Image: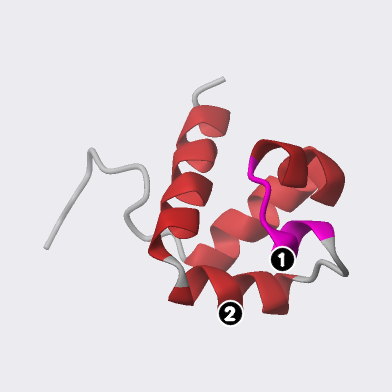
Amino acid sequence: MDQPNNPLHGKTLEFIVVYLVSYYGWEKLADRIPVNCFRKNPSIKSSLKFLRKTQWARDKVEQLYLETIRK
């Protein structure tokens, strides 16, 4: 299915997390989305594991990504 107007189309969760970490850093990312996977010993791997199991947190990450790319 082609989704040319969907900015998340073709973007993996890993891509989004890596982008946000490079843009904000772990500390500022944890301030914006206060979850332990961003606060305590953060890593891409642990964050992805948590976000794949926790839809509300994934929704917040995707929303922050959309807000960030629109700046």
Residue ranking furthest to the left: 1
Is 1 above or below relative to 64? Answer: below
Residue 9 position within the rendered picture, expressed as x and y whole percent measured from the top left: 32, 54
Is 66 above or below relative to 15? Answer: above
Q: Which mark is residue 49?
A: 2
Residue type (three-letter) at the residue carrying disc 2:
Lys
Residue 32 position within the rendered picture, expressed as x and y whole percent measured from the top left: 67, 37
Q: State yes or no: discs 1 and 2 in contact (Cβ < 8 Å).
A: yes
Q: Quadrant of the N terminus?
A: bottom left
On whether residue 34 falls in the magenta region, the answer is yes
Residue 38 position within the rendered picture, expressed as x and y whole percent measured from the top left: 75, 58
The magenta span reads: 33-39
Q: Nearer the viewer, residue 8 or 24?
A: 24
The residue under the point 50% across, 29% down is 67
Q: Quadrant of the C terminus?
A: top right
The residue under the point 70% across, 79% down is 45
